[in-house]
């Protein structure tokens, strides 16, 4: 805006023009030096070169608008252009920082990869030296044969045989052929032979398994059970799986029940006796109850310690008695005799065999009939059964017998 000063009133006296008071700026502000002022004023007799034709004809004051302008408003705020420029500059700076961090990470990863390759190469180079150290610590590993004292019996076995299956097994750890998280204890006998405190008879089967034999389904029940324990001790999962197959085959003949320990799993041969349990009956009273699932060919009885061959007809075994599904009863106590036309054993029947060694008798309970015979001099008896074809039998737990059957199946006469 333009500033102006009114001319003084004519008081009738001629006055000379006063050039010193021609400024139109407010008091206290210098219009030339103040950067916020957009005007300048000149006296009437000032520099004529700076006065254009648009000067005030009164000659007192003229105002000139400055062609310069500020990038900020009157309050000092930035314009949109300045804000956008600043944001762009900050974004570029952040992008450059992220790029620098990524490049630093990539560089570190490449360095780690290089170091890993170096470590792997060093490990490969050091492997022969480690083999030499292992050879000095475990000389048995590099011998052609190994001498072992198993339960007091000496065995000489090729090292390759002991290490042939189920690595890492007990022998890999014992002989230092496998680096594992634990060390097998090593004991030496008086001949400086490695001693293993296990059953030597089972160790023969262990070595046969390592040699590739698979006849273990022919072993008796006691041997099978001990072999399972030692197979776990020697860490041979292949042998355990093989023995597990034997158990599954036996379950075709016996349903799960307490005390079921078939002596063989060849229960479908022409003749065969399966012993129940591994504890002989010496004194006291004993009872067992069978539930007959399938009675194609079954027989229940007792055998004594004089029985050494179970691959024959049950009733031809010395010191035994047997009750067949056809209602035929045989006994060799105290001499051989046969009874026929007794109660037949059918599917779903419960057969109980009770033994009183104090009074010396055995009693059969089937349906509503009872059969009692003397044991004579027979001692150390064991329950046994024979089955062929598709026969299936389950041993009934004692608590189930008391719950489901009459007292005649579990009580003794006084």
Image (cartoon, rainbow, N blue to C red):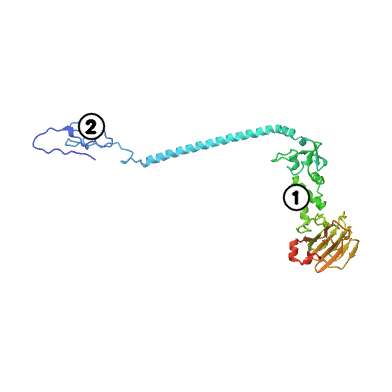
- Residue at image x 83%, y 64%? 363
Q: Is residue 194 above or below residue 405?
A: above
Kindly tell me whether residue 243 is visible in this rendering. yes
Q: Residues within 10 Å of mark 2 (few under 14, many from 20)?
A: few
Q: Specify whether residue 268 is in view.
A: no
Q: In the image, 6: left or right of 351?
A: left
| Residue 280 picture location, percent across and down | 82, 55
Q: Nearer the viewer, mark 1 or mark 2?
A: 1
Q: Quadrant of residue 11?
A: top left
**Image coordinates for residue 158, horizontal then vertical, percent:** 80, 39
Query: Residue at left 43%, top 39%?
Result: 90
CB contact under 8 Å: marks 1 and 2: no
Quick one: which residue is furthest to the bottom in this view?
368
Q: 200 or 93: which is nearer to us? A: 200
Residue corresponding to mark 2: 50
**Residue identifier under label 1:** 241
Tag 1: Cα neighbours inside 10 Å, few (<14), some, or many (≥20)? few
Q: Position of residue 143 (x, y in %)?
A: 79, 35
Q: Position of residue 29 (x, y in %)?
A: 24, 36
Given residues 282 and 20, the one toward you in this image is 282
How many marks on residues?
A: 2
Vertical placement of 384 versus 22: above or below? below
In the rendered image, the quadrant that contains the C terminus is: bottom right
- CA separation in Å, label 1 and label 2: 117 Å
Q: From the image, which quarter does the N terminus lie in?
A: top left
Choose between 93 and 325: the one closer to the eye: 325
Residue projecting furthest to the front:
414
> Along the line of sight, which residue is nearer the eye, 177 or 233?
233
Is 344 rendered above or below residue 125?
below
Residue 366's label in the rendered image is: none
Q: Helix, strand or loop at disc 1?
A: helix
**What secondary structure is marked by label 2?**
helix
């Amino acid at each position: 805006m333009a500033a102006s000063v009114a001319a003084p009133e004519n008081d009738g006296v001629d006055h000379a023009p006063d050039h010193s008071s021609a400024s139109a700026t407010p008091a206290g502000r210098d219009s030339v030096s103040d950067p916020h002022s957009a005007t300048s004023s000149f006296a009437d007799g000032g520099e004529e070169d700076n006065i254009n034709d648009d000067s005030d004809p009164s000659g007192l004051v003229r105002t000139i608008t400055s062609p310069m302008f500020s990038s900020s408003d009157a309050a000092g705020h930035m314009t949109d252009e300045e804000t956008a420029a600043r944001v762009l500059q900050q974004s570029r700076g952040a992008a450059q920082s992220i790029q620098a961090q990524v490049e630093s990470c990539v560089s570190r990863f490449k360095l780690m990869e290089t170091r890993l390759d170096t470590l792997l190469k060093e490990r490969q180079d050091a492997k022969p030296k480690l083999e030499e150290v292992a050879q000095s610590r475990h000389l048995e590993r590099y011998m052609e044969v190994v001498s072992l004292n198993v339960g007091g019996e000496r065995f000489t076995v090729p090292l390759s045989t002991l290490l042939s299956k189920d690595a890492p097994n007990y022998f890999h750890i014992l002989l230092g052929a496998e680096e594992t998280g634990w060390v097998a204890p090593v004991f030496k006998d008086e001949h400086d032979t490695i001693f293993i405190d296990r059953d030597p008879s089972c160790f023969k089967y262990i070595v046969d398994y390592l040699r590739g034999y698979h006849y273990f389904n022919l072993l008796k029940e006691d041997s099978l059970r001990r072999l399972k324990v030692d197979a776990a001790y020697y860490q041979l999962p292949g042998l355990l799986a093989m023995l597990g197959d034997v158990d599954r085959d036996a379950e075709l003949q016996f349903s799960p029940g307490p005390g079921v320990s078939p002596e063989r799993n060849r229960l479908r041969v022409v003749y065969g006796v399966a012993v129940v349990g591994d504890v002989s009956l010496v004194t006291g009273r004993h009872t067992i109850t069978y539930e007959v699932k399938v009675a194609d060919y079954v027989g229940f009885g007792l055998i004594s310690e004089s029985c050494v061959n179970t691959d024959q007809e049950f009733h031809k075994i010395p010191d035994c008695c047997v009750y067949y599904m056809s209602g035929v009863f045989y006994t060799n106590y105290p001499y051989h005799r046969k009874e026929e036309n007794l109660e037949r054993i059918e599917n779903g029947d419960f057969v109980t065999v009770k033994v009183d060694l104090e009074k010396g008798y055995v009693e059969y309970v089937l349906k509503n009939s009872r059969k009692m015979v003397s044991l004579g001099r027979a001692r150390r008896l064991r329950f046994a059964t024979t089955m062929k074809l598709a026969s299936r039998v389950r041993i009934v737990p004692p608590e189930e017998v008391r719950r489901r059957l009459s007292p005649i199946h579990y009580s003794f006469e006084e």
